[in-house]
Amino acid sequence: MEILIKNMVCRHCVAAVTRILEQLGIPYTTVEIGRVELPAMPSDAVLDAFSDALAREGFERILDPADALVERIKHTVRHHVRTEDQCRLNLSGCLEKRLHQSYDTLSRAFSQHEGRTIEKYHIALKIDLVKELLADASMTLAEIADRVGYSSAAHLSRQFKNVTGMTPTEYVRRGDFARSSVK
């Protein structure tokens, strides 16, 4: 049984949800960003307790089909950004293949629900990954651009400045490396 969870954005969120499952004694198969796989359907009382515990940590079980679709889109876009160097498809192709719906349908549903386009969400996630890689300081800007799917370091720098208001160099100098804020 799959349970979709809203507001999971990083490995710390995965750890928090895993801890909740273990505290409640709920057996699970997989916990990843945005979803939990359970081997069997728990009782309504257990699901209610799980929902309450999630809410105390800032998460939410997704019950509405439209919300579920948007979360699946977000999960796929996050996966695409994190594995773009391995993915041979463009974002629209990746979404269509994994979600078995046309990109137009997915894009319309996402925009209506989120008030932003899939493309804007994709860019925000890419910039978030760039911030992580800059904080790590083990790659050059050109290597980061290549890893994240930008055609050049200059293109990355322009988009980074458009989104954050500063250049990557200014961001590194500032040294205030916050965790992901993209939901």
Image (spheres, rainbow, N blue to C red):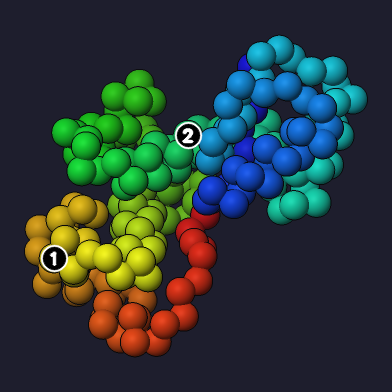
Give the structural element (helix, strand or loop) at label 1: helix
Q: Estimate the x, y position of residue 119 in percent, counting from the top left.
A: 31, 52
Taking the image as shown, residue 87 lies to the left or right of residue 179, namely: left
Labels 1 and 2: the sequence-earlier one: 2
Left or right placement of residue 103 versus residue 42 in this view: left
**Residue at the outermost top position:** 40
Which amino acid type is shown beneath numbered disc 1?
Ala
Q: Position of residue 142 (x, y in %)?
A: 13, 65
> Mark 1 highlights which residue?
142
**Residue 51 visible in the snapshot:** no
x and y percentages locating residue 160 in the rendered image: 27, 72
Instruction: Locate the N terminus by quadrant.
Output: top right
In the picture shown, does residue 142 fall above or below 166? Answer: above
Q: Nearer the viewer, residue 24 or 157?
A: 24
Pick the front one: 21 or 112:
21
Q: Residue at x 90, y 25 (%)?
A: 45
Instruction: Kindly identify the residue that appears in the image at 83 percent across and 42 percent down.
Output: 52
Which sits in the foreground, 79 or 113?
Answer: 79
Residue type, numbered disc 2: Arg
- Do we see residue 182 in this rendering? yes
| Residue under label 2 | 72
Relative to residue 172, is residue 152 depicted above or below? above
Q: Residue at x 82, y 36 (%)?
A: 23
